[in-house]
Image (spheres, rainbow, N blue to C red):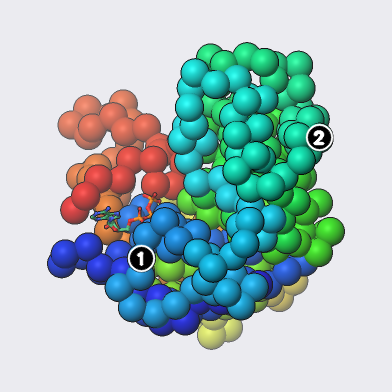
Amino acid sequence: MIELSGLTKRYGDTVAVNNLSFTVRPGIVTGFLGPNGAGKSTTMRMMLGLDRPTAGDVLIDGQHYDRLRDPLTYIGALLDAKAMHGGRSAFNHLLCLAQSNGIPRSRVHEVLDTVGLTSVARKKAKGFSLGMGQRLGIAGALLGDPRILMFDEPVNGLDPEGIHWIRTLMKSLASQGRTVFVSSHLMSEMALTADHLVVIGQGRLLADTSMADFIAQNSRSYVRIRTPQRERLLDVLHGAGTVVVETGGGVLEVDDGKPEHIGELAARHQIVLHELSPQRASLEEAFMQLTAESVQYHAHTDVPMDASPGVPGTPDVQPLQQWGDDWTRS
Ligand SMILES: Nc1ncnc2c1ncn2[C@@H]1O[C@H](COP(=O)(O)OP(=O)(O)OP(=O)(O)O)[C@@H](O)[C@H]1O
């Protein structure tokens, strides 16, 4: 287990981590989420004894990191895949780590095999692609066969095959009863990987909950409706006491509505529907809602809500590829 109590880190006037208390448990993948600058990396560095807390405590299996004997056998971490000696081969990089932690040479071969780098083991790490570097970093984390694993943004920059591999690996490590703690800003990725979520914003704990509860508590469920008889349907729905939100583009939304009730009501009044679909906000939407007030970086598009690409007088705007792609300090 990893236990944080009142963990705090200040850099001058900046409170990077603010009185964080939570426990990371074995047997599941725990996702660590937060907007850019929320304090995820600082928290992970303190867990590994790389940064000293201003206040509070973090314990690994009941001990401080710097009191662990052969720490790689307790906790393995991938913090920065580029943090290695580029002139060393993958094999030698791992061998150095193994020798300084009392781990047998045979284990180096095993972890190279696990991460699929055996064929390039003698190549220098500086020639590795981002994905190969991530795999080598993960091999280092696995080297001591630790019960606890920690990965900081492990899928950053990986191709779909690499992402799938890391996802499967994390789940299989958790199913072996290990503690797996993984940070990410990719909401969709966390939805597929994590069983439990710890969400922080501006260094503070915002949620510590199961994935299912997080979505249920933070997301909105609604019915989306499109009809060529908009005015008629609005009258009928209002007449039935239903609150309807018009969201533009001819789309109507009914919060917590039942599609069957709306469909039957429309049928009774012979109103044609082109769409009647139940919707539940994704993890990404739930996350954005929860962290909205604590986001340190905001995208500046300065585009009116109804601006459309290609229309004279309105700027041409491409949708963001991924939430958080275009954040700049406000
Ligand atoms: N060494 C440092 N000196 C001063 N400020 C720092 C230092 N390290 C982090 N910070 C500040 O602490 C806050 C938290 O940073 P941190 O890197 O932990 O966030 P993060 O959640 O990992 O962000 P990201 O997702 O962008 O990597 C930020 O405001 C950052 O600027």
| The quarter of the picture showing ligand 1 | bottom left
Q: Position of residue 32 (x, y in %)?
A: 53, 61
The disc at residue 106 is 2
Residue under the image location 44 percent in, 77 percent down: 57
Q: Position of residue 44 (x, y in %)?
A: 47, 59
User: Is 150 positioned to the left or the right of 295 in the image?
Assistant: right
Would you name the residue on which mark 1 appears?
52
- Label 1 crowd (10 A; few <14 / some 14-19 / many >=20): some
User: Is 172 positioned to the left or the right of 17 in the image?
Assistant: right
User: Is 145 positioned to the left or the right of 266 in the image?
Assistant: right
Residue under the image location 39 percent in, 47 percent down: 324
* Up/down of 88 relative to 206, above or below: above
Q: Position of residue 55 (x, y in %)?
A: 33, 78
Residue under the image location 72 percent in, 45 percent down: 103
Q: Is residue 27 visible?
A: yes
- Label 2 crowd (10 A; few <14 / some 14-19 / many >=20): few
Along the viewing direction, whichever of 131 and 125 lies nearer the viewer? 125
Residue under the image location 69 percent in, 20 percent down: 121
Along the viewing direction, whichever of 320 and 316 lies nearer the viewer? 320
User: Is 70 positioned to the left or the right of 43 in the image?
Assistant: right
> What type is the residue that disc 2 sits on?
Ser
Which element carries disc 1, helix, strand or loop? loop
